[in-house]
Amino acid sequence: MSFKVDIQNLNLYYGDFHALKDINIKIRKNSVTAFIGPSGCGKSTCLKSINRMNDLVPNCKIKGKILIDNQNIYDSRTNLNLLRKRAGMVFQRPNPFPMSIYDNIAYGPRIHKIKNKKILDEIVEKSLRSVYLWDEVKDRLNKSALGISGGQQQRLCIARALAVEPQIILMDEPTSALDPLSTIKIEDLVEMLKVNYTVIIVTHNMQQAARISDTTAFFLSGNIVEYANTSKIFNNPTDKRTEDYITGRFG
C-alpha cells in the first residue's frame, strides 16, 4: 500500500493553546480521506498543516513531522511555493479572483513561469474540463469569474488548483456554502479526482463523509480518536465517542 502523506507526532500550538495533540496518521495515495468532528476539534488546523498554511498564523508553533512522498515538509529547506503547488487548497466559500474566468485558471501557471499563450489555452481548457465546467463557460472565458453561480465558482476554484498540476487536493468544507445540486456535483467530482490525486476533505456533513471518502479520521479536542476505513467508522466504530458523534448524541 502506497502512502502519500505521513503525519508523525504532530503537535501544534496557537500561542499557549494546544490545538493538535500527537497526531499520527498515514494517508493513502489516490484516495479520499475525510476529517470529521465538532467545530474547534482541530480538523481544519490539521488540513492546513499539510501545505503549511498555518505558517501564516501569528504565534503558531509546530512540532513533529509531515512527510509527503517521504520528504519532511517542515524541513527548513522546503520551498513553500513548490509545496503549495503540490498540495492545493480549496476553501469553504468559493473565492475566485476578481478577474476573468480564463485569468483565474492561468494565474498559477503564469506564476510558475508559463507564458506561452497556446500552452495556457490548453491548461485552461483541460482544467475546466476536469471539473465539468468547460461547456458551461467556454463562451465567456473573458468575463468576470464573479458573474457565475456559487457552485460554478467552487468548481472554478478546484480547476484553478488543478491548473498547477498538484498531487494532493486539500478541501476545507468545500460544499458548506452551496445548494444541494451544486453539492452533488462537487461530490461526484471528488470521486473522479481520486483517480489522479490524493484528496483530503474536511466536512461537517456525516452523510457526505460516508458517501465520498475511503477512510475517515474522527477528531475531538485536538486528538484523533479513531481513523479507519469509512465503512468501519460509520458501521462499526471502535470508540464509543465516535459512535456518539456519528449518531448525533453530541457535536
Image (cartoon, rainbow, N blue to C red):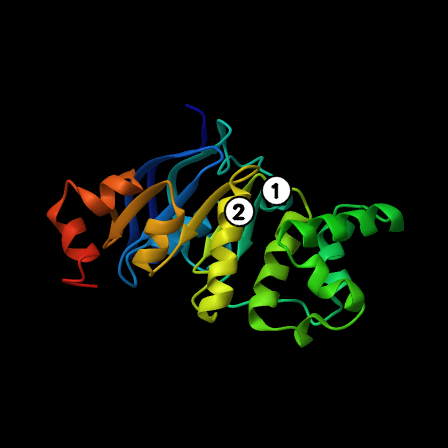
| Of 96 and 137, the residue lying toward us | 137
| Of 14 and 71, the residue lying toward us | 71
CA–CA distance in space, label 1 to label 2: 7 Å
Secondary structure of the residue carrying tag 2 is strand
Question: Which residue shows up at 33% across the image and 60% down it?
Answer: 205
Badge number at residue 166 = 1
Residue 152 vertical placement versus 28 (above, below): below
- Report the residue that reaches farthest toward the bottom: 147
Residue 113 in the figure: left or right of residue 236 = right
Asked if labels 2 and 1 touch by Cβ distance under 8 angstroms, the answer is: yes
Q: Position of residue 138 (x, y in %)?
A: 77, 62
| Of 112 and 2, the residue lying toward us | 2
- In the rendered structure, which amino acid carries the disc numbered 2? Ile
Q: Is residue 225 visible?
A: no
Question: Which residue shows up at 72% across the image and 65% down it?
Answer: 137
Residue assigned mark 2: 169
Residue 50 in the figure: left or right of residue 224 = right
Q: Position of residue 202 (x, y in %)?
A: 39, 54
| Picture mark count | 2
Q: Is residue 117 visible?
A: yes
Q: Position of residue 63 (x, y in %)?
A: 37, 41
Secondary structure of the residue carrying tag 1 is loop
Badge number at residue 208 = none
Q: How dense is the environment of label 2, judged by Cα within 10 Å: few (below 14), some, or many (20 and up)?
A: many
Residue 141, by quadrant, is bottom right
